[in-house]
Image (cartoon, coloured by chain):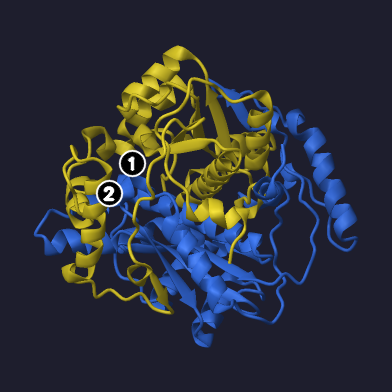
Chain colours: A yellow, B blue
Amino acid sequence: MNNQVLDLLLKRRTIRAFKDQTLTPEQYQTLTEVVRQTATSMFMQQTSLIHVTDPEIRTTIREVCNQPYVGANGDLFVFVVDLYRNRQILATQGLATEQMHGTDVFLQAVEDTVLAAQNFTTAAESLGLGAVFLGSIQNDAQKVVTALQLPELTFPLLGLQVGIPDQKPQLKPRMPLSLRTFTNHYQPDYQLADFGEYDQVVQTYYDLRDANRRVDSFTHQVGTNLTKSPAQRRHILDILHAQKLCLH
Amino acid sequence: MNNQVLDLLLKRRTIRAFKDQTLTPEQYQTLTEVVRQTATSMFMQQTSLIHVTDPEIRTTIREVCNQPYVGANGDLFVFVVDLYRNRQILATQGLATEQMHGTDVFLQAVEDTVLAAQNFTTAAESLGLGAVFLGSIQNDAQKVVTALQLPELTFPLLGLQVGIPDQKPQLKPRMPLSLRTFTNHYQPDYQLADFGEYDQVVQTYYDLRDANRRVDSFTHQVGTNLTKSPAQRRHILDILHAQKLCLH
């Protein structure tokens, strides 16, 4: 099976080096229109998009992400979980707003936000652009909230740096589907040995990519990434609560 | 700007009526491979996919969703937030697993899951298939957890019914971008009047679509959907905690 869409989705790479050029107005219009047309939970459209062009804010977000390409060449966007807009609609109608502070509607808005971020990226890639999702804005989400003047009931979920690729990275090898797809029931019997072959594939990938970088297996990366996160990332629940999200 | 990808993303419709035919093995393989290649936070690949073929489980999920097309014609999938797999990898290495119970890594896994669900859907649509996201599995997530035998540190986030479309719905009109996209700072000054024109457009859409259905504006739907959710949806945080997710 083959078509332009599958080709794009099956061969996608994260791009982290961009040429010194920003989106054209036509590209910007097309990409935001794709966000607008993305599927949305219960038609509630609970996501907003912020285009970050101000050099000071770009610097702030670069420092939060601790990655030199953030807010540098290309365009920087922040995808925002947005329950504020519909809360305002409820409030001006004199209706109860308690539900907006719950986990249910927060997850719906998170879904709206991530669906839109993926479609924006797919559309950008179809135009020959490249992109990198910036989960690293969670290194200090409060700083991003302040910089973008985000009101309560909003949350900056994902950043995205997009632009004309200035690198051609290799496809990164992924875990075999046998470990990630199931029929009818989840199979919880993982043994470390199940990941042995995949660990080898990942090590070979790093080895070929950059002789100067330490070769790292998947299971070793799990041990590194999932045991010592930056201190601020341990306060995300506090930040959500300060934004009056996920209170119940 | 135009290409096959943009065409798909800009004209997508949710499909809720399917012909009595399931995915071919080639289609299944292609769609799951797209899931495998989807971007993933920190390379941690924290999502799993369950193909629900068992008639009893399909009935259970249909009842949870309370929609006759769920688990009927076509194929039913559940996209699962999966921190269990990497927790097992940590545990078998004798490493600390406390971080796996935090909100930070939960949101990362949610992102992985929704990115994969969107790419699966885009790929399906490129093959002439249609799909509907089933956020409605949250009507009783605990029942879905039990039916799919999901272990702790997993959570059924989104269902998806996919198949050959047996309807040609109209494009549903979306909120103007001026209310959803911003530059540098969020603009929190919404007035109900800002939504007046859009309310008209939505009402006209319903009026033309189905003369027998009550014509409903956007702001009225916000009032309906976001004030009285099903009782079980108010316990999602409890279910997450029971799965040992988002504990801190």
The mark closer to the camera, 2 or 1, is 2
The answer to whether residue A205 is visible is yes
* Residue in the foreground of this view, choosing between A131 and B114: A131
Q: What is the three-letter code of the residue carrying label 2? A: Gly
The disc label shown at residue B129, or none: none
Please name the residue that numbered disc 2 is placed on. Answer: B102
- Which mark, residue A237? 1
Q: Are marks 2 and 1 in contact (CB under 8 Å)?
A: yes
Image position of A225 with respect to A50: above or below: below
User: Can you name the residue that lies furthest to the bottom here?
Assistant: B55
Decide which of B230, A218 is in the foreground and name it.
A218
Q: Looking at the picture, how far across and down is residue A210, in whole percent? A: 24, 40
Which amino acid type is shown beneath numbered disc 1? Leu
Residue shown at the point (21%, 50%) measured from the top left: A221
Foreground pick, A44 / A115: A115
Indicate whether B241 appears above or below B76.
above
Query: Residue reaching furthest left?
Result: B94
Residue B84 lies, in percent from the top left, at 28, 63
